[in-house]
Image (cartoon, grey):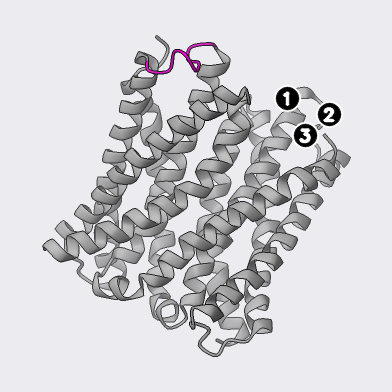
Amino acid sequence: MIYNWKKIVRFGLPLLTLCIIIEIFAGQILHLGQKTLVVFPIFLISIPVINGVGGNIGCILGARLASGLHVGYINIDFKDKKMRENLIIAILMGIITYVILAILIYFIASLGGVLMGIGLIKFISVILGTGVLLVCIISLASVLTAFWSFKKGLDPDDIVAPVVTTIGDTLGIILLFLFIGAVGI
Amino acid sequence: MHAKEMLKQSLPLLIFCGLGGIVAGTTFGVMTDIIQNIPGLIVVIPAIIALRGNINTTFGSRLGSAYHLGIINAENMWNNELKQNIIGSLILSFLISIIIGILAYVTTILFFDVHPDPLKLISIVLLAGVISAIILTMMTIIIILIVFKQGYDPDNITGPALATFGDIVTMFCIFGSAILVEGIM
């Protein structure tokens, strides 16, 4: 038998507790902005989308970099051509995905009658601003984490996913509030 | 794999996951009344979603590895290896849920001087954490079983599938638990 529930709990508990502490801070930022979110539920609808897409892109990029590093066609070098190609495509995918989903969310919110006078352009500006900045930071974090863990002799496959999803959740919420404020909602 | 293939293979999946995010977000948007009625509830939401994501993707990826190692297969699923994995995931969910409840309670008092009902908050997190764990563990096993029968590699399927359904199921569980606990207490 290779699996043992005690081992699963013992290995899982420390990393999960650390993630949870950071996520509670993300939750407190939501708490801070609760009034805005309750008045404009369209942003509550957007939060799982913003965080989910950001985290997924970070994970896909991380998994690709990990494979490249393991096989040897990507080197630990910030000028590495293959790495840069992956990085640019990841950011591009993020932009396309956020535009499509922002329009969809706006359409669903207008069907549900919860637009609260927010215009399409204003809403897309907030989501796209948040999304583009988020994917850029997450993608860079993914590259840094993949390089760092590989250099340390750790498997990037184990490390990148929890790191980028936690960054995505926290930063996604902070950036959303910044852009809501910047656009003047 | 070239960058163009990455765009072709990952973009549809990203948008599909984003659609799942919209469903989860809409549940979040419908919850505005209960969020206002139960102080501290909004704080636990990112943490419970992250807990589910982390525990289930590691569970799924361990089952994937077990499949590759030949420990489990479609004919021999319900063995002790799988049971140990299920027990480990459930105990982790139980423990981390309690930690989330306590952390949310303490930080809400510290940061906002708002005093949530600790018993109510911890009951909601525990109920949502454990129920979503049971549902998603069963879903993971069903997904793995289908993937085995079709002869696909579980590593390519379980991650995105769990990420998409995980958020929706978890959001429903938080909402349901909040209504239930609010009704009883």
**Within 10 angstroms of label 3, few (less than 14), some, or many (20 or more) residues?**
some
| Whole-percent x, y for residue A101 in the image | 64, 65
Q: Left of B133 or right of it: where is B12?
A: right
| Whole-percent x, y for residue A119 in the image | 63, 87
Residue corresponding to mark 2: A73
- Magenta highlight range: B70-78
How much space separates mark 2 and mark 1, taking CA atoms? Answer: 8 Å
The front one of B110 and A12 is A12
Q: Secondary structure at mark 3?
A: loop
Have a look at marks 2 and 1 and say if they share a chain. yes
Dot 3 and dot 1 residues touching (CB under 8 Å): no
Quarter of the figure with the N terminus of chain A: top left
Q: Magenta-highlighted stretch: main secondary structure?
A: loop
Residue B95 is covered by the magenta coloring: no
Residue placed farthest to the bottom in the image?
A117
Query: Which quadrant would residue B114 be assigned to in this image?
Result: bottom left
Residue drawn at x 73%, y 62% is A95
Residue corresponding to mark 1: A70
Have a look at marks 3 and 1 and say if they share a chain. yes
| Callout 2 amino acid | Tyr
In the rendered image, the vertical position of residue A21 relative to residue A128, given as above or below: above
| Callout 1 amino acid | His
| Whole-percent x, y for residue B58 in the image | 48, 32
Q: Secondary structure at mark 2?
A: loop
Q: Left of B183 or right of it: where is B162?
A: right
Label placed on residue A76: 3
